[in-house]
Image (tube, rainbow, N blue to C red):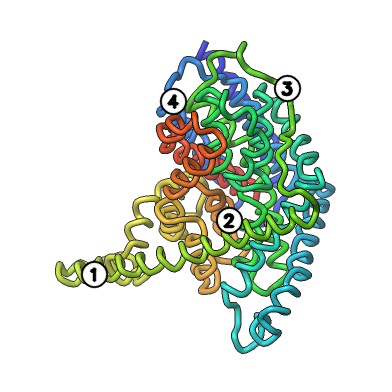
Amino acid sequence: MVKKYSFRLLLVLIACFTLVSPALSQTDGPGISVEVIGRGLLGLVFLLFIAYLFSNNRKAINWRLVGAGLFIQFMFALGVLKVDVIHIVFEWISEQFVAMIGVFHKGTEFVFGTAFADPSGPWGFVFAIQVLPTIIIFSALSALLYYLGILQLICYGFAWVLSKSMKLSGAESMSTAANIFLGQTEAPLMVRPYLPKMNRSEILCVMIGGMANTAGSVLSAYVQMLGGTDQHAQAFFALHMLAQSIMSAPAAVVVSKMLYPQTDEDAIVRDLQVGKERVGSNLLDAISNGTTDGLKLAVNVAAMLIVFTALVYLADAMMFKIGNWTGINGAIAGMTNNVYDGLRLGFLFGYLFAPVAWLIGTPSHDMLAMGQLLGEKTMINEFYAYGTLAKMKANNMIAPMSRSMIIATYALSGFANFASIGIQIGGISTLAPNQRQNLSELGMRALLGGTIACLMTAAIAGMLY
C-alpha cells in the first residue's frame, strides 16, 4: 500500500516538474535551468522524508492527501508567478496593500509629527515609528473585518477548498484557512467550540497551521522592513508575502498529516461551521479591542527584539573572545574570505543550516548567508531574521530581487520558533483547557512541522522564480 501511494506521489512530483519546466524555459532570469528545478524537487523530497521519519504512524500516512497538497501549492505558485492574468491580479492586490500602509501612516504622522514619521527625513527609518504602529493598525482592521463577518466569509472560501481537496475535518480546514490572515492564537477562535473535542492529529494541524502562516498584522511589518521606503519594492515583497501565506496553508496540512496521520476517519466532522466568537459588542468596541490587541503585540515584538538582539550581541562578544583565546578567529576570517571576522553565532548558524539552504534551492554563493538566516529564524525569531535579511539586502550580501532573496522571503515567514511553542500552549489552552497536555506534548513536533512547511514554500518559489 505504501509503495503504491509513494509511486502516486512520485507521479505528482513528475507532473509538477512537467508543468514548471515550460514556464521556466521562457524566463530570462540568470541561472534558471533544469538543475534549479531538480534541486528544488530534491529539497521537497528531503523535507517530506524528514516528516515521514518523524511520523508517529508511517503506515497510516494518506499519500493521496500529500499529493493533493503538493499539487495545490504548485498550481497556486505557478499561477501567481507565471500566469499573467493571475499575476496581474495579485500584483494589484499587493499595490493596494502598500497604498493602504501609506494611508495608515497618516495616523503615525499625527502622533509623532512629520519630522519623526517621515522615513526620508533626518531621523530616517526608525523601526519603532515606521513598523510597530502598522502592526497596531492592521490588528484593528482585522478586528473590524471580523466583526463585519467579511473575514469569516473569505476564510470559509479557503476552508472549503482545503476540505474538499484534502478531505479534512471542517474545524481543521477553517482554522488553517484563518491562519492565512490571523495569528496563531487568534485563528483558533474560529473553531473554538470544536477545540475541546479535537483529537491529537487535529490539534497538531491547528498548531502547525499557526506556526507556518503569517498573520496580516505582522505581514505588513515584514513588507516595510524588506521594502524600506521604496513603494515598488514594498509591492514586490507584498506580492510574495501574500503568495507565501496562502501556499503555507496546504503545506501545513501535508506536514501535519504526515507527522500525525488521522487514523479514525469515521470520527471526523466534515461540516464547515464559522465560529460565532464576537470581538466586540459593537463596531467601535471591536475596533478598540483590535487596537488593544495590536498594541500588546507591538509591545511584545519590541520587547523581544530588544532582549534577543542584546543577548545575541552578548553571545557574539563572548564567542569572539573565545575565538581570540584559542586563535581560531583568524582561521575563520581566512576560510570565509572575511565574510565572518571570527567565531560568531552567524558563522555557526551559517554552516549548520547551509546544507538545508542548498537543498531548498539557494545558489551556492549565498548558502552561508541563508544558513545564518534560517538559524536565526528558528533559534531566535522571524522578526530578528527579517531584520538581518534587510541588512544583508542593504549591504548587497544578498542581491535584491534575486532568487536567494525570494527563497529567504518565503523561508523566514511563519512563527516557527521555540518561543511560539509557549505562545500556543498559553493561547490555545485558554480556549480549551483540556487540551493543555496535548499542546505541551506536541509542541516540538509542531515546531518541526511549521519549519518544514515554510521551507517547502521556499523550495517551490525558488524553482519558479
Q: Is residue 41 visible?
A: no
Q: Earlier in the sequence, mark 3 or mark 1?
A: 3
Q: Residue at x 64, y 29 (%)?
A: 193
Which mark lies nearer to you, 3 or 1? Answer: 3
The residue indicated by pointer 4 is 55
Counting other residues with Cα less than 10 Å from the Cα at mark 1, is it few (<14), some (14-19), or many (20 or more)?
A: many
Displayed quadrant of residue 55: top left
Q: Nearer the viewer, residue 250 or 292?
A: 292
Which mark lies nearer to you, 2 or 3? Answer: 3
Displayed quadrant of residue 116: bottom right
Mark 2–mark 3 contact, CB under 8 Å? Answer: no
**What's the mark number on residue 271?**
3
Counting other residues with Cα less than 10 Å from the Cα at mark 3, is it few (<14), some (14-19), or many (20 or more)?
A: few
Q: Earlier in the sequence, mark 4 or mark 3?
A: 4
Q: CA distance from mark 4 to mark 2?
A: 28 Å
Q: CA distance from mark 1 to mark 2?
A: 31 Å
Q: Is residue 1 above or below residue 232?
A: above
Q: Amino acid at mark 2?
A: Thr
**What's the mark number on residue 409?**
2
Q: CA distance from mark 1 to mark 4?
A: 41 Å
Q: CA distance from mark 4 to mark 3?
A: 27 Å
Which mark lies nearer to you, 1 or 4? Answer: 4
Q: Earlier in the sequence, mark 1 or mark 2?
A: 1
Q: Amino acid at mark 1?
A: Asn
Displayed quadrant of residue 166: top right
The residue indicated by pointer 1 is 329
Q: Does residue 234 appear to the left or right of 308 in the view shown? A: right
Q: Secondary structure at mark 3?
A: loop
Mark 1–mark 4 contact, CB under 8 Å? Answer: no
